[in-house]
Image (cartoon, grey):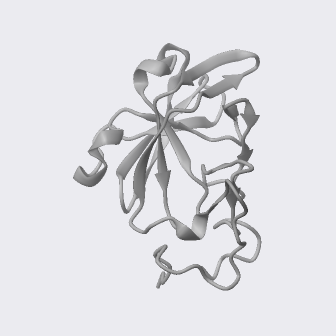
Amino acid sequence: MWTFTGKERPPFAEVPGPGQESVWDYPRPPALVDDARRVQVRASGRVLADSSRAVRVLETASPPTFYLPPGDVALDRFVDAPGRSFCEWKGAASYLALDQATQAVAWFYSDPSPRFARLRGYVAFYPSRVECFVDDERVRAQAGEFYGGWVTDEIVGPFKGDPATGHW
């Protein structure tokens, strides 16, 4: 049973410095937070998305996931990818790939749960599979192939998915 809810930082959590956030201060259930910084996603030199209207999903123990409005994503560069997953908070996710031969690089919710209805059609990207940037800082991927959190210098952990975190 998960006991962390963002109300109290556990003793093993890193202490954030000036201008940093601890993922252990993020709430559970997750919060949606507007982010006006420039977010860009690229693959092989091509811009796939460029936005200053992102929404960050902040959930205890996870680096933020950035969701971009569909109007800021070059949706014509993607194809549907096989597979579906279910998030206990947001609902059923669908996946996008760059072509039929590649794995999914992004996901979205076409019919999210009421609490997360604002994310309808917004696209999130795996920083392990495409190049993601926040205000020109290259995003590092959250450990674990399933996760899509965006690790930047402003975020401290440890993060869910890191080695030896399976007991969380």
Q: Nearer the viewer, residue 109 or 41?
A: 41
Q: Residue at x 51, y 33 (%)?
A: 36
Q: Nearer the viewer, residue 83 or 126?
A: 126
How many numbered badges does the structure rendering display?
Answer: 0
Q: Position of residue 7 (x, y in %)?
A: 46, 77
* 17 versus 45 height, above or below: below
Q: Quadrant of the C terminus?
A: bottom right
Q: Residue at x 28, y 42 (%)?
A: 111
Q: Quadrant of residue 104?
A: top right
* 73 versus 97 height, above or below: above
* 44 versus 90 height, above or below: above
Q: Nearer the viewer, residue 78 or 112?
A: 112
- Indicate left or right for 97 with 155 as reference: left
Q: Position of residue 159 (x, y in %)?
A: 67, 66
Extreme-front residue of the structure? 18
Q: Residue at x 69, y 33 (%)?
A: 133
Q: Nearer the viewer, residue 35 or 56?
A: 35
Extreme-left residue of the structure? 114
* 58 versus 45 height, above or below: below
Q: Residue at x 57, y 32 (%)?
A: 37
Q: Position of residue 23 (x, y in %)?
A: 59, 64
Q: Position of residue 96 (x, y in %)?
A: 52, 31
Q: Quadrant of residue 135?
A: top right
- Indicate left or right for 19 with 86 as reference: right
